[in-house]
């Protein structure tokens, strides 16, 4: 469901009702005569929908985490806020950038339109920038020939299935974050898709090597062995970017997560 398009159509419809009532219908009604209910409700909703549309399109947008691909950073059921302007001002609905601001940085948690199906929103961590050489071999990440620092951080308990995963702290640029790597999961990838710039990647039984094209980004989930990401379906083009995730504002299952920044 394209909620942005639905909201835009509602905005246009209520704006037309408001304008028709303000400049035409109101002048023709007898003094004290009430407006038709459809005009009254439509016109009264216009300012509310306008405020929601502006906030959601240009400032912040809420999302709900549907899968465990970003565990332990984000859990299933987290409601998050996404900064819509940090990577540039984009036109609503068509998502075209009109005012460039900042570029995504390694370590950012980014929401984007899934390249294989732009009607879906995905969330992953930015690992490779345009022009980077990214390698994920034997479950070790290397960017431009430099191993990304990784240190053990105990174990993570999956409360839904009651098992533990090895937890690590990874440092991408100046940012540190936690991730999970399963020791007994295979390093090779299955069901790799045929994506644009597929020729930029080399797959082996040990992992994958890719050179990120200009205007694209390489992203991965923090739950490395349970994430379908750039290793499988390719690079994220700049025009698919929605914004940077930065705040957990609710979780029905764990109130302690409310207010977390990352």
Image (cartoon, rainbow, N blue to C red):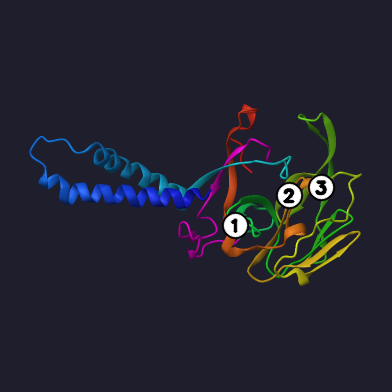
Residue 66 falls in image quadrant: top right
89 relative position to 162: left or right? left
State which tag comes first along the sequence, 1 or 2: 1
Q: Please name which of the two marks, 1 or 2, marks the residue nearer to the observer.
A: 1
Q: In the image, what residue occupies the spot 49% across and 61% down? A: 94
Q: Is residue 4 visible?
A: yes
Mark 2 secondary-structure assignment:
loop
Mark 1 secondary-structure assignment:
loop
Q: Is residue 235 above or below residue 22?
A: below
- Badges 1 and 2: C-beta atoms under 8 Å apart? no
101 relative position to 229: left or right? left
Number of marks in the image?
3
State which tag comes first along the sequence, 3 or 1: 1
Q: Mark 1 points at which residue?
A: 118
Q: Mark 3 points at which residue?
A: 225
Crowd tier of the residue under label 1, counting other residues whose Cα lies within 10 Å: few below 14, some 14–19, many 20 or above: few
Crowd tier of the residue under label 2, counting other residues whose Cα lies within 10 Å: few below 14, some 14–19, many 20 or above: many
98 relative position to 224: left or right? left
Residue 83: x percent and y percent? 53, 50
């Amino acid at each position: 469901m394209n909620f942005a398009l639905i909201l835009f159509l509602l905005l246009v419809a209520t704006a037309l009702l408001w304008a028709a009532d303000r400049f035409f219908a109101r002048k023709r009604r007898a003094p004290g005569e009430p407006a038709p209910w459809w005009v009254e409700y439509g016109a009264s909703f216009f300012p509310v929908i306008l405020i929601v549309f502006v906030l959601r399109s240009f400032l912040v947008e809420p999302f709900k985490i549907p899968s465990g691909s970003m565990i332990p950073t984000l859990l299933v059921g987290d409601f998050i806020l996404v900064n819509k302007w940090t990577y540039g001002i984009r036109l609503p609905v068509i998502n075209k950038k009109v005012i460039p601001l900042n570029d995504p940085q390694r370590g950012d948690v980014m929401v984007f339109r899934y390249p294989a199906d732009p009607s879906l929103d995905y969330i992953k961590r930015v690992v490779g920038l345009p022009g980077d050489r990214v390698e994920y071999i034997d479950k070790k990440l290397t960017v431009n020939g430099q191993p990304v620092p990784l240190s053990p951080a105990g174990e993570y308990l999956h409360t839904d299935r009651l098992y533990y995963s090895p937890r690590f702290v990874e440092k991408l640029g100046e940012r540190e974050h936690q991730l999970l790597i399963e020791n007994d999961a295979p390093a090779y990838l299955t069901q790799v898709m045929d994506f644009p710039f597929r020729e930029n990647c080399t797959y082996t039984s040990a992992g994958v090597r890719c050179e990120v094209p200009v205007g694209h980004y390489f992203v991965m989930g923090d739950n490395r062995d349970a994430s379908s990401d750039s290793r499988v379906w390719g690079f994220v083009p700049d025009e698919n970017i929605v914004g940077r995730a930065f705040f957990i504002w609710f979780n029905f299952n764990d109130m302690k997560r409310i207010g977390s920044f990352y």
